[in-house]
């Protein structure tokens, strides 16, 4: 008999060995997949490293790719930590981009040092408000947040498309000659562009620096505050949390708002750091919100670990664009991400459980007892009794 038995005490070394072994296993499985599709695994891995790290400008581009993934990964991790399955980071990021771009256009007369915080606040508020809808439904009507957040992603995408392609909204460019040929959003003014840290040839986006600081703050909040303690209690045992007097509804609503606000900051960063325009198609094709769920799962919902996992996923995304061609479809990159996620999450069971194998023992054959001898009647005199 084979079964998993829960560990009473998890050794610390398992928290490092198991994830490392799962990554190695993922590379082996992905190598088999690459070989089966006619690609040399070692050559492909070498190209991935070159395209994401060592080629000129590759490392800076990897930092660009990981920045929105950090925000959506943190948004998913903070909610999943309390077993709130916020799948709506995609839509919340859309609203963050809408709010930040609208603020950048409307308050264009402000100096940059003041306009950038206004854009961040607008993106944060837009994401919080959008996430509060499924949060309210979950807290007060016990609605499944997976379905509501997922459905609201499509609503947010349609609103974003409507603002640029199907209306004469404030976000749409109606003046430039190129906009008359094809609908597009207004370009943000120069003072709305977020600054970047330049270290030699390396460019570090402002959003990335802010996301790293935010990850540390979230980790400190979870580990060292009463709010974080109540989060962990409700995640482990909701019944115990209610018995202890923790206001579950407020916690659910506030945590969903925090998660949505973080995703909204990701949308604001995408507009302020990189695109400088509300681009519905570009945001939808990137799929930052859904990839952020993968980042959070690989990080085991640890905000600090999100920084590391988003970097590696950013490497894959950046390398996927560089390797994409007739012989290397972009779907192979997504397949490699899926293999990595499957191996890491599948190996997680070995951290908290140990495998126990019991061989069946041969049972001795039982002897069937002989039937009792028939009782003979005893004769008394001339009769029978």
Image (spheres, helix red, strand yellow):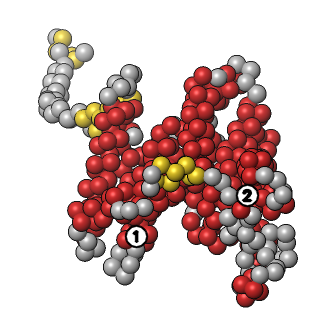
Q: Tell which residue pokes out farthest to the front in this image.
A: 200
Query: In what quadrant of the picture does the C terminus appear?
Result: top left
* The one of 116 and 356 positioned closer to us in this rendering: 116
Query: In what quadrant of the picture does the N terminus appear?
Result: top left
Q: Which residue is mark 2?
A: 191
Q: Which mark is residue 57?
A: none
Q: Nearer the viewer, mark 1 or mark 2?
A: 2
Query: Residue 146: image x %, image y %?
Result: 65, 52
Quarter-wise, where is residue 27 in the image?
A: bottom left
Q: Which residue is mark 1?
A: 322
Residue 256 seen in this snapshot: no
* The one of 372 and 317 positioned closer to us in this rendering: 317
Q: Is 182 displayed left or right of 12 in the figure?
A: right
Query: Residue 96: image x %, image y %?
Result: 72, 55
- For label 1, the crowd category at 10 Å Cα-Cα, with few meaning under 14, some 14 to 19 and many 20 or more, is some
Label 2's element?
helix
């Amino acid at each position: 008999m084979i079964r998993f038995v829960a560990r009473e005490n998890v050794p610390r070394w398992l928290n490092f060995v198991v994830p490392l072994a799962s990554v190695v296993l993922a590379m082996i499985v992905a190598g088999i997949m690459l070989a089966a599709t006619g690609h040399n695994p070692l050559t492909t891995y070498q190209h991935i490293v070159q395209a994401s790290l060592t080629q000129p400008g590759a490392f800076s581009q990897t930092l660009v790719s990981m920045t929105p993934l950090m925000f959506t990964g943190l948004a998913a991790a903070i909610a999943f930590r309390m077993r709130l399955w916020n799948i709506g980071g995609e839509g919340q990021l859309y609203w963050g981009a809408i709010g930040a771009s609208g603020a950048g256009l409307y308050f264009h007369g402000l100096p940059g040092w003041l306009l950038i915080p206004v854009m961040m606040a607008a993106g944060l508020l837009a994401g919080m408000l959008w996430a509060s809808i499924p949060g309210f439904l979950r807290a007060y009507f016990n609605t499944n947040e997976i379905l509501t957040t997922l459905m609201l992603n499509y609503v947010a995408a349609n609103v974003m498309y409507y603002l640029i392609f199907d209306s004469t909204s404030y976000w749409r460019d109606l003046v430039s000659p190129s906009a008359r040929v094809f609908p597009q959003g207004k370009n943000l003014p120069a003072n709305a562009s977020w600054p970047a840290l330049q270290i030699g040839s390396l460019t570090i986006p402002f959003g990335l620096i802010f996301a790293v600081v935010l990850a540390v703050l979230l980790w400190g909040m979870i580990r060292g505050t009463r709010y974080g303690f109540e989060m962990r209690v409700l995640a482990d045992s909701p019944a115990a949390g209610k018995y202890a007097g923790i206001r579950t509804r407020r916690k659910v609503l506030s945590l969903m708002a925090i998660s949505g606000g973080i995703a909204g900051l990701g949308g604001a960063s995408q507009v302020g750091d990189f695109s400088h325009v509300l681009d519905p198609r570009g945001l939808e094709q990137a799929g930052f919100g859904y990839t952020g769920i993968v980042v959070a799962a690989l990080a085991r919902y640890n905000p600090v670990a999100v920084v590391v996992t988003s970097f590696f996923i950013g490497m894959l995304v950046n390398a996927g664009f560089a390797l994409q061609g007739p012989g290397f479809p972009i779907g192979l990159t997504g397949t490699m991400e899926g293999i990595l996620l499957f191996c890491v999450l599948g190996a997680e069971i070995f951290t908290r459980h140990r495998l126990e194998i019991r061989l069946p023992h041969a049972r001795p054959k039982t002897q069937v007892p002989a039937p009792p001898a028939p009782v003979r009647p005893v004769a008394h005199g001339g009769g029978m009794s």
